[in-house]
Image: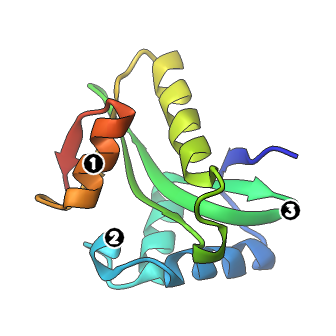
Amino acid sequence: MPVIVEAVRQPSDQDRSDLAKIYADAPDWLLAPHADGAALVAAGLAAGTLIAGRFNDRLLGAALLERGDGHWRLSHLCVRKVTRGRGVGQRLLDEARRLAREAGAPLHLAAPAGHLESQALAARAGLPLDSL
């Protein structure tokens, strides 16, 4: 069964629990400028930018996808620690790239300035990196 990427608009109680677990595993640098995972999720829901990967009715990874005029930005990509290395993050990245391409916009990754892990991910994905 594949990971289904979806926009999260009205999360169920289970979805909220899954999102809390996803961002509980996130390093502090990934949450910035938000105070914590709950604030990040609330901001993403309010702005309509939260996307998530679902497998077997559970959310395993999430990110914020901002749809701009000149380009789209994917940020705050995080996968539950117990699920990492199984392609969930790649599936979120691929779907964000596909959606941006269909809208005629290039996709950029966004991360804190100077963060080496983010720079490496952007290079592997062949995407420009914007600073948050």
Q: Amino acid at mark 2?
A: Leu
- As drawn, the label of residue 120 is 1
Q: In this image, 97 relative to 95: left or right?
A: left
Q: Residue at 32%, 81% (x, y): give it.
A: 28
Q: Amino acid at mark 1?
A: Ala
Q: Residue at 71%, 64% (x, y): give it.
A: 59
Q: Amino acid at mark 3?
A: Asp
Judged from this view, the residue extending furthest toward the front is 85
Q: CA distance from mark 2 to mark 3?
A: 25 Å
Mark 3 sits on what residue? 57
Decide: marks 2, 1 in contact (CB < 8 A)?
Answer: no
Q: CA distance from mark 3 to mark 1?
A: 31 Å
The answer to which of 46 and 60 lies nearer the viewer is 60
Q: In the image, is residue 38 above or below residue 15? A: below
Q: Secondary structure at mark 2?
A: helix
Q: Residues within 10 Å of mark 2 (few under 14, many from 20)?
A: many
Q: Earlier in the sequence, mark 2 or mark 3?
A: 2
- Quadrant position of residue 84: bottom right
Of the two numbered discs 3 and 1 in the rendering, the one whose residue sits closer to the viewer:
1
Relative image position of residue 71 (x, y in whole percent): 31, 29
Mark 2 sits on what residue? 30
Q: Earlier in the sequence, mark 3 or mark 1?
A: 3
Residue 8 in view: no
Q: Earlier in the sequence, mark 2 or mark 1?
A: 2
Q: Secondary structure at mark 3?
A: loop
